[in-house]
Image (tube, grey):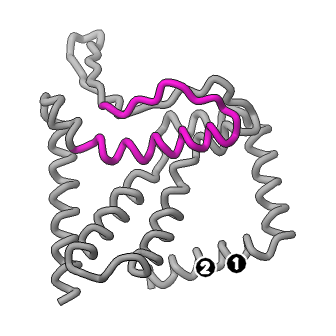
Amino acid sequence: MIELYVFISIVIIIMLERFKQNSVQSDNEFQVMVFYIYSVFFHELAHYVTSMILLGRPSGMTIVPQRNEYTFNDGTKHVMWEFGSVNHNNANFINAFYIGLSPLFLIFLAYFIYSNFFYYFEPTGLNIILLHLLVFVLVSNSLPSSVDFKLAFKYLYGVALNMSFIGIAYIYFPTIQGVFYETKSLINSVIF
């Protein structure tokens, strides 16, 4: 019976993703908002929380998609969507790297929820579907955007400094090595 619920959640996820893609191609702003607001929320919240923790002084978080029209020199019009943003008043060479790449932490959150969900909830059909939907939403929004990458790699010396911190932490703290090993084992078990 569990296989049926897993199948149903896969079908729902594929349908939601298809509706999401089709909504961007339409001119209906309400439809875009309905299919993107749940995903934009977690992505922007990751930026906001990381910026607060690392003293980036976040302000002005928006999660409502906005439609922007651009006209090229040849007269053709192009529509681009801005799905959400967070302004950081104190993004510097130390915290910009982590603020920009903070949505990647949603993958670890999704794994934690996936690993511990049934310790707190009964494995009913509805809970199985909700678990898969939640994991999908978190993982599908964990990829940083091009604006996020620009912020993260704005200060190259900051990137080098932060990578050095991560390398030193990996060498001197065995717990972090265990996290990397578990992540590698998880990826290998999914791929192979």
**Where, quadrant-wise, is the N terminus in this rendering?**
bottom left
Mark 1–mark 2 distance (CA, rounded to whole Å): 6 Å
Q: Which residue is mark 2?
A: 182
Q: Secondary structure at mark 1?
A: helix
Q: Was residue 60 drawn as part of the magenta stretch in this picture?
A: yes
Residue at image mark 1: 178
- Given contact means CB atoms under 8 Å apart, are the residues at marks 1 and 2 in contact? yes
The local crowd at label 1, few if under 14, some if 14 to 19, many if 20 or more residues have their Cα within 10 Å, is few
Q: Give x and y (percent) for residue 189.
A: 48, 84
Looking at the figure, which quarter contains the C terminus? bottom left
Please say whether residue 57 is one of the residues in the magenta stretch: yes
Please name whichever residue, 121 or 30, is drawn nearer the observer in this view of the structure: 121
Q: Which mark is residue 54?
A: none
In depth, the one of 168 and 88 nearer the eye is: 88
- The x, y position of residue 75, in whole percent, is 21, 10
Q: Residue at x 20, y 36 (%)?
A: 32
Q: The magenta stretch spans which residues?
A: 35-64
Extreme residue toward the bottom, this view: 1
56 sits to left or right of 160: left
- Left or right of 101: which side holds 86? left
Q: Residue at x 53, y 64 (%)?
A: 108
Instruction: Tell me the kind of residue under disc 2.
Output: Glu
Residue 38 pos. (x, y %): 30, 46
How crowded pointer 2 is (Cα within 10 Å; few <14, some 14-19, many 20+) is rated as: few
Q: Is residue 101 above or below residue 57?
A: below
Report the residue at 82% width, 53% height from top: 164
- Tag 2 secondary structure: helix
Q: Quadrant of residue 138?
A: bottom left
Q: Amino acid at mark 1?
A: Gly
Question: Looking at the picture, does residue 96 appear above or below residue 20?
Answer: above
Q: What is the magenta segment's predominant secondary structure?
A: helix
